Amino acid sequence: GAVVSQHPSRVICKSGTSVKIECRSLDFQATTMFWYRQFPKQSLMLMATSNEGSKATYEQGVEKDKFLINHASLTLSTLTVTSAHPEDSSFYICSARWRGGRTGELFFGEGSRLTVL
Amino acid sequence: LAKTTQPISMDSYEGQEVNITCSHNNIATNDYITWYQQFPSQGPRFIIQGYKTKVTNEVASLFIPADRKSSTLSLPRVSLSDTAVYYCLVGDIDRDDKIIFGKGTRLHILP
């Protein structure tokens, strides 16, 4: 099946620094990628929808200046957590949409665990 | 995506068949039903997708009644490794602007 690679899988940073998470679709072109955030024992919360070549659409309550999303190519989207603080510590997951058949499919990355000290 | 309702948690024993039901009263004509499995600290993984009646693959079966307002994921002869959270998504993944997850069902398999 299609593969979505997310990097890094774990990152620890100091408060105030910025962290970039990459999401790559390895064997298909993804015009749309979705970014999620997940707290322990909770469901995935959609943060934003990223369309190639255009600005991301953020969900209500998600600060676009805090969580910068760039989808510059059909195979790469990045999420940058700017000036990270401990409350930004979470598990971040990307998903790429593949449109190739009767129905679309979603492929998820492995997730990135961010710990802000 | 249509709103879904699933049991918060379920327990079962190894070797048993597990059925997880999802309610989706507002399902639209173009919507499909897709189930995902998520292990701790991993991204969700596709299990099965269907539109109506019954779909079966190597890991699960999906039963969808004629009115399509609910669906049941059936896992045959579960093992400890099936302990995970299972999410039911209802919508047109190909077209929907947002893909929003419900709360999912936390399945715990006991020895």
Image (tube, coloured by chain):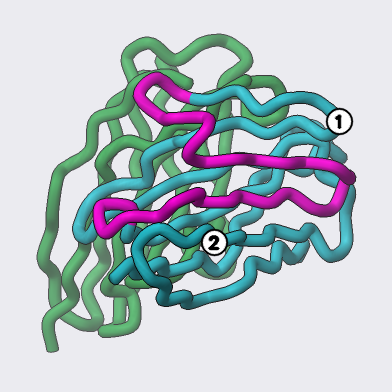
Q: Is B15 one of the magenta-colored residues? A: no
- Residue A7, image x, y percentages: 63, 71
- Residue B44, image x, y percentages: 48, 59
Closer to the chain start, of discs 2 and 1, is 2
- Name the residue tied to disc 2: A19
Q: Residue at x 32, y 55 (%)?
A: A85
**Disc 1, SS:** loop
Q: Is residue B99 visible?
A: yes
Furthest toward the bottom, the residue is B111
Q: Which chain is cyan?
A: A
- Quadrant, the C terminus of chain B: bottom left
Q: Is residue B52 visible?
A: no
Q: Residue at x 33, y 53 (%)?
A: A88
Q: Which residues are magenta?
A: A59-88
**Disc 2, SS:** strand
A32 horizontally vs B50: left or right: right
Chain ID, mark 2: A
A52 horizontally vs B16: left or right: right
Label for residue A53?
1
Q: Viewer-nearest of labels 2 and 1?
A: 2
Q: Color of chain B here?
A: green
